């Protein structure tokens, strides 16, 4: 009897894995193709006066680009602590967070808790409807996150995230956000200001220090 139960359980496990892989492939094969132009958004055009000062920007998004070498280590540490603690240990998907999210979703319903890594967040911002929490969208997100990690280095991925993420007030990217909210470059921020910018992407409008200063002080 024990042997029968063991082999039945083993068969069910293999069947479940095969079925899951089939469903994943069915959704993933229709995923869009990664492109550098899509991942690294275009910058707005700046108009200068005769003294070389910016008096207007053309474009719907405000964004100043910063390279990885110029991103403060304190900001990188704060981002990873908040968003993706095992960033340097996974290949685009975090099995530990994924397991916790599966349990939470079983208990509280599909979509109750996410397990998105930085790579998955970049994919959502670049290609997919992040409000659409369907199984198909999550499968494509996972597939593209794995591709992203194959094509780009970890430092490239952090650079893309820091420059792409939405920071409220039509501001995209943390360098632009630093200038917008604090009037200085990222490298000149103190620890509290750095922590605020790192936590803002979780709820940009709610943690906007101009509109909600009390909530901004509690930024995770």
Image (tube, grey):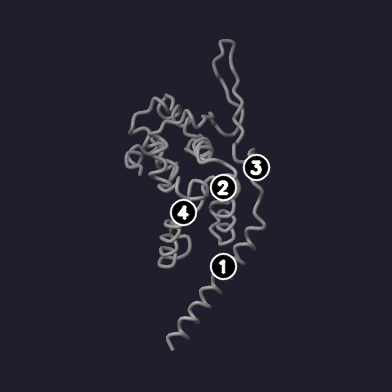
Secondary structure of the residue carrying numbered label 3: loop
Place of residue 32 in the rendered image (x, y in percent of width and height, measured from the top left) = 66, 50
Cα separation, mark 1 vs mark 2, equals 22 Å
Earlier along the polypeptide chain: callout 1 or callout 4? 1
**Picture coordinates of residue 67 (x, y %)?**
52, 30
Can you identify the residue that label 2 sits on? Answer: 123
* Above or below, 186 relative to 131: above
Residue plotted at (38% across, 34% down) = 74
Helix or strand or loop: what does disc 4 sit on?
loop
Quarter of the image where one finds residue 209: top left
Which residue was labeled with disc 4? Answer: 94
Q: Are marks 3 and 4 in contact (CB under 8 Å)?
A: no
**Along the line of sight, the residue nearer the viewer: 14 or 53:** 14
Answer yes or no: do the residues labelled 1 and 2 have beta carbons within 8 Å? no
Mark identifier at residue 20:
1
User: Which circle's residue, 3 or 4, is located before the other in the chain?
Assistant: 3
Structural distance between the alpha carbons of marks 1 and 4: 18 Å
Q: Residue at x 59, y 34 (%)?
A: 60
**Secondary structure state at the residue bearing disc 2:** helix
Number of labels in the image equals 4
Image depth: mark 3 or mark 4 in front: 4
10 Å crowding of disc 4: few (<14), some (14-19), many (20+): some
Q: Earlier in the sequence, mark 4 or mark 2?
A: 4
Rendered position, 36 above or below 109: above
Which of marks 2 and 3 precedes in the sequence?
3
Marks 3 and 2, how far apart at CA: 11 Å
Q: Which residue is mark 3?
A: 35
Q: Who comes first in sequence, dot 1 or dot 2?
A: 1
């Amino acid at each position: 009897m024990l042997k029968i139960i063991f082999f039945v359980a083993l068969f069910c496990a293999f069947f479940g894995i095969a079925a899951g892989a089939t469903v994943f492939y069915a959704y993933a094969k229709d995923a869009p193709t990664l492109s550098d132009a899509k991942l690294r958004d275009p910058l707005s055009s700046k108009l200068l006066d005769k003294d070389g000062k910016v008096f207007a920007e053309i474009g719907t998004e405000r964004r100043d680009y910063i390279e990885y070498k110029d991103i403060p280590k304190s900001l990188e540490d704060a981002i990873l602590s908040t968003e993706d603690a095992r960033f340097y240990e996974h290949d685009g998907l975090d099995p530990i967070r994924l397991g916790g999210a599966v349990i939470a979703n079983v208990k509280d319903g599909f979509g109750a808790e996410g397990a998105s890594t930085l790579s998955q967040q970049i994919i959502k911002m670049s290609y997919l409807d992040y409000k659409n929490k369907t199984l198909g969208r999550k499968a494509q997100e996972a597939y593209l996150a794995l591709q992203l990690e194959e094509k780009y280095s970890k430092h490239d991925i952090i650079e893309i995230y820091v420059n792409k993420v939405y920071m409220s007030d039509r501001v995209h990217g943390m360098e632009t956000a630093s200038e917008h909210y604090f009037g200085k470059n990222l490298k000149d921020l103190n620890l509290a200001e750095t922590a605020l910018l790192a936590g803002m992407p979780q709820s940009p409008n709610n943690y906007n220090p101009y509109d909600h200063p009390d909530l901004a002080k509690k930024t995770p």
